[in-house]
Image (tube, grey):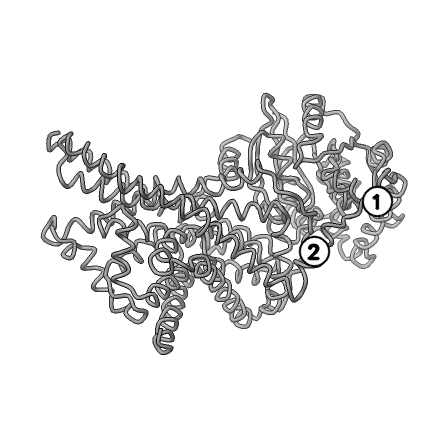
Amino acid sequence: MSILINLIIAAVIIAFAGWQIVKLAKRSKHGKCAACDYKCEAKKMMVEAEKRPH
Amino acid sequence: MTTIALFGNPNTGKTTLFNRLTDSYAYMGNWSGVTVEKKVGAIKDSDITVVDLPGIYSLNPLTKDEAVATNYLLSEPQELFLNVVNAAQLKRNLLLSIELLEFGKPMIIALNMIDSLAQLGIRYNLDVLEKAFHCQVTTTNARGNKGVNALKDQLLQDDHGMTGDTDFKLVYPAAVQQAAEQAVRGLCRDNDYDERFAYWLAIQFMNANAAVIHYAKEHQLTALLNQLPYYQAQKFEEKIYQTRLTFIENTLQAAREQAASPRVRNLTAKIDRVVTNPILGLPIFALVFLLMFKLTFDWVGTPISDILDGWLSGPISSTANHLLTQAGAMPFLRSLIVDGVIAGVGGVLVFLPQIFMLFACISVLEDSGYMARAALVLDKIMSKVGLNGKAFIPLIIGFGCNVPGIMAARTIEQPKERLITTLISPYMSCSARLPIYSLFVAAFFNKNQAVIVLSLYFLGIVVALLLAKIYQIVFKSEDKSFFMIELPDYHLPQPAIIWHGTWDKGKGFIHKAGTIIFAGTVVIWLLSYFGPTGAVANVNQSFSAIIGRTLLPIFHSFGVTSWEAVSAILTGIMAKEVISSTLMVLYHTANRTLLVASLSQLFTPLAAYSFLVFVLLYIPCFATIGVIHAETGTWKWPIYSVISSFFIALLLATLFYQGGLLLGL
């Protein structure tokens, strides 16, 4: 495995982690269900309902 | 697309029926206050959408979540109402049915929990009910899945035509009737309303429905607003209520038939005499929780967890290391994957058996009917601190996760009481704290694991209640919310419901492992791998060591002597599970036995317990801070929560530690 591939894999892992933290911070700002990591059915349905036109 | 709106009193099995009808699963509990937002599902292979609304006793909203149902009626289109009523509590349940029927939409009344009614030895003639209410009446037992398919067929048949009588009109006393007709004329003339809707609005307005009064003001319905003082002076609200009640009583009397073999609710009554006893109630509650932790930590959860840990720290770690070396991965990548991701994320995942066991126990308590009794028992203590049993529901949901716990506080109608419940909810020991408890009790209190964890849970409750009392005095909260909870019959928990409940609560933990726990692990690995001079060979020179050592003096007061623990406390604010994964990463081990051995050299049992007290009470996680902001609508309360919880945690952990030292522990 070349140094470049090593670096790319490490960068992907770190970037994914960074993205998760940014996502958490953004969702926490919205509060309510968005802040919660528990993807329960109720939450999924609410998200779908929001997408659905009335 | 056809929309069916699901209405009913709390705890009528509405959510269960919703899940059965829509072939999906929404969180349900055998106690009121579970549905806090409307939920939407679809009946399989059809274009029918079912909307599950929060349980309400009437359309006149007393609480925030009750307003969801009324506002839904006023603002969104729906083709059919499905009114779920508790067959054993018809007199009160049908009050809501009348309000819905007056709205004029086709409606089906589902007499749910029909088995409970049969146990009471009562049967109703459905034809009589159908004639009286001018709508279809059907019987179901959603829990046992009886009558649900017939109801589903009925809904599918009526899919497009949506047939059904809509001409239900209750005759009110002459004065009410005249005033309503006058208002209808005005509304149809001035606002171009449909006569039926205008009639419903007028009756609701006279009935002092807060949401409808708000609606009238918003739409400047002068035909109603001008008459408000007259309606109030004439006490129309009381007259409307009495008329409805009399109608229901007469109808039920006419429809009632005695079943062949009456069976009384002997067993439930007998059990209730013991578990809700003023003296025995609380010790039984404590015993039930102790049993729950025994199962979680001593008997089932930990032994399975140990097996998982053996695999993770042994074959999985070494195979990953071996494969990475073979593939030519450089040491830093190997360390990131093995010492970081596998140790951190895997180290938390091995606690899954404990977490699932705890959730299974909570689901059993909910489904059996005990949780409603627990709320009743707690009501007596809660009332002493100015809260009532209703506040217990958000608090117990908080045992799973504080976020839905805080959201459930919406069921409390008094704003100050709701705020108090929101502020004390984070002190409930959520499941994310379990991994760190598990780690520490295994290291320091191997023989008393369940008792130690139970003491932490109870400490959380005690702190929350004491704070509630203080807040009550400070906020001068005098208005009392009323507490009404249905005590459902006890029944044997159903495996399918237990499994769904456990999975629904537990899968979030797995999801978190792949997201925020992963992120926290990578952050702490970076901080421990690098220092001011670049990559460091000795973790003691890393950034995490520098930060940890700088802050260490703050935590000296309760016996923390290692910078690793301080780093874990800091990263734990992202999500509490990260506390354990941080320790795994900082000690470069996925092996829990090795970590336990390292920990026992750094903490005394007293310091370890004080550390757990601190972890229980300190700053809520990001998601909880976010939900406090969303629910209170200001940043003032989340900031207050962060600062106060930190100092309360510090104070209590110090008190425990210093007190223990004085006692020679």
Please state which of the two labelled residues, at mark 2 or mark 1, is closer to the viewer: 2
Name the residue carrying label 2.
B272
Q: Report the residue at 27% width, 53% height from top.
A: B595
Left or right of A49? Residue B243 is right
Seen from the viewer's position, the closer of residues B234 and B105 is B105
Q: Position of residue A54 (x, y in %)?
A: 56, 31
Q: Position of residue B656 (x, y in %)?
A: 39, 71
Give, as a three-letter code, the residue at label 2.
Answer: Asp
Name the residue carrying label 1.
B248
Q: Which mark is residue B383?
A: none
Seen from the viewer's position, the closer of residues B323 and A49 is B323
Q: Secondary structure at mark 2?
A: helix
Which residue is at the far bottom?
B662
Tell me the quarter of the picture where residue B162 sits: top right
Q: Secondary structure at mark 1?
A: helix
Left or right of B108? Residue B215 is left
Q: Report the residue at 57% width, 71% height from top.
A: B476
Q: Position of residue B117 (x, y in %)?
A: 78, 41
Q: Chain of mark 2?
A: B
